[in-house]
Image (tube, rainbow, N blue to C red):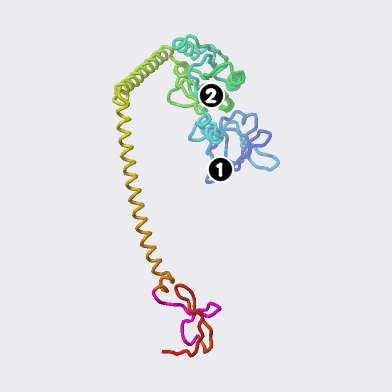
Amino acid sequence: MVRGEISNFKRHYSGHCYFTLKDSEATLKAVMFRSRAQFLKFEPKDGLKVIAGGQISVFERDGQYQLYVEQLIPEGMGELSLAFAQLKDKLAAEGLFDEARKIALPLLPSAIGVVTSPTGAAIRDIITVAKRRYSGVQLILFPVQVQGPEAPWQIAKGIEFFSHTRQVDAIIVGRGGGSLEELWAFNDEKVVRAIAAASIPVVSAVGHQTDYTLADFAADQRAATPSQAAEIVVPDVKELAKYIISLRNNLENNTINMLSNRRHRLDNCLSSRSFQRPELMLADKRQMLDDYIQELRESLCKNVLNKRHSFNIMAEKIAMLNPLAVLERGYSIIRTYDKRVIRRTRDTMPGDVLEVVLADGTIVVKVLEPEER
C-alpha cells in the first residue's frame, strides 16, 4: 500500500490510467489497467491524495520501478463519497438540477408509473397509500432491480419507457432504505440523466430521510419515503371533495351576498326622489338652466359695453392723429409737383411752383423769395 498525491494523471483511450504518486521526498510511477480502472467509482485527478494498493515491478523498457495498481482509495474521503461529490458537481454544471426545468405534478392523476422492485416493501407501501387516498387511480409497475450492477440500467430504462409511451401522468422511482452502497444505483449517471430528460414529472422516493441521492436533485419532487411519494402524487379524494364543497359554499354565499347588495341598491333607486318624482328634478334643472342663461346674457352685454368703450377711445386717438383733422384747424401741407413735402425754406428756390394742400383742396403758388427766420 502506497500513500501519495496523484500528478500527471492521464486516462488512455484504451482505458488504462497512467499517473505518478508523489510526496515531499519521492515519486513513483504507477499504472492501473482498464480491467481494474473500470470499477472505480470516482474520477482520479491531479492533486488528489490517495492510497494505492498493488505490486511493484520493473518496467523493462525504461528500467524504472513502477507500481501496478489494483486498488485505489481516496485518502480522508470514502470512494463513494468522492464519486458522489464529483458527479454532483458535473451534473449541476450542466443544469440538470435547475429549478427552472422541473415539471409540476398533476392535480388528479389517472395513472401513475412506478419504477421499483416488485418484491420490495416500497411497492406495497405505494399501493396501500395510493388506494387509501384515491381508489380510482391506476398504478403501473415497471419491475427493476434496485441494487447491483444491473440496477442503474434497468431503472433508467423504466423511466424512459413511461416517458416515451406517456401512458401515465407521473412517475415514482425509488426503493426502501439501505446503506450508501445499497442505494448507489440512484446515484448512477444513467439514472440521473433519465430522470432529468423525462417528459412527465418524476418523484424520487428513495427511503432515506437525512441523506440525498443524485436522483433526488434531478427529480421534479423529492419524497423521503415511498409512502410519502404516494401521498405527494395521489390526492386524498375525501379532502379534495371537502375542498370542492367549501368552494361551492363560498361561491353560493358570494352569489347570494352580491344579489342582496344589488337588490338593496335597486330598492334605493326605486325609492329615491328622482325616480318617484322625476318632474321635480327636471324643474330644478330647468331653473338652473334659466339662471345660467341669465348670467350668460348679462356677461355678454357687459363684455359688449366694455368692447364698445374701448373702441370709442381708440377711434378718438386715431382721429387726433388724422392729418386731415389737422388741416381743418388751419394748417396746410406744401409740396412740389412730384409730391415731395417742403419742410424748410432752404428746400425752395425763387421761381419754384408748389402745391399748397388745404382741407378742401389745393392751391398752386410760385415762390418769389424764400426767407428764413
Quarter holding residue 57: top right
- Residue 46 screen position, x and y as percent: 57, 41
- Residue 26 screen position, x and y as percent: 56, 45
Magenta-drawn stretch, dominant element (helix, strand or loop): loop
**Does the magenta run of residues contain 93?**
no
Report the residue marked by disc 2.
186
Residue sitting at 59 percent across and 33 percent down?
A: 54
Q: Are marks 2 and 1 in contact (CB under 8 Å)?
A: no
Depth check: 259 or 181 in front?
A: 259
Is residue 149 in view?
no
Mark in front: 2 vs 1: 2
Depth check: 61 or 251 in front?
A: 251
Is residue 60 in view?
yes
Relative vertical location of residue 152 with respect to residue 50 in this rendering, above or below: above
Residue sitting at 41 percent across and 77 percent down?
A: 331
Which quadrant: the C terminus?
bottom left
Report the residue marked by disc 1.
22
Q: Which residues are magenta?
A: 329-347
- Residue 249 screen position, x and y as percent: 37, 15
Q: Is residue 63 left or right of residue 267?
A: right
Q: Amino acid at mark 2?
A: Phe
| Spatial separation of the CA atoms under disc 2 and disc 1 | 35 Å
Q: Amino acid at mark 1?
A: Lys
Label 2: state its secondary structure. helix
- Residue 357 screen position, x and y as percent: 48, 76
Q: Residue furthest right?
A: 61
Depth check: 328 or 5 in front?
A: 328
Which quadrant: the N terminus?
top right
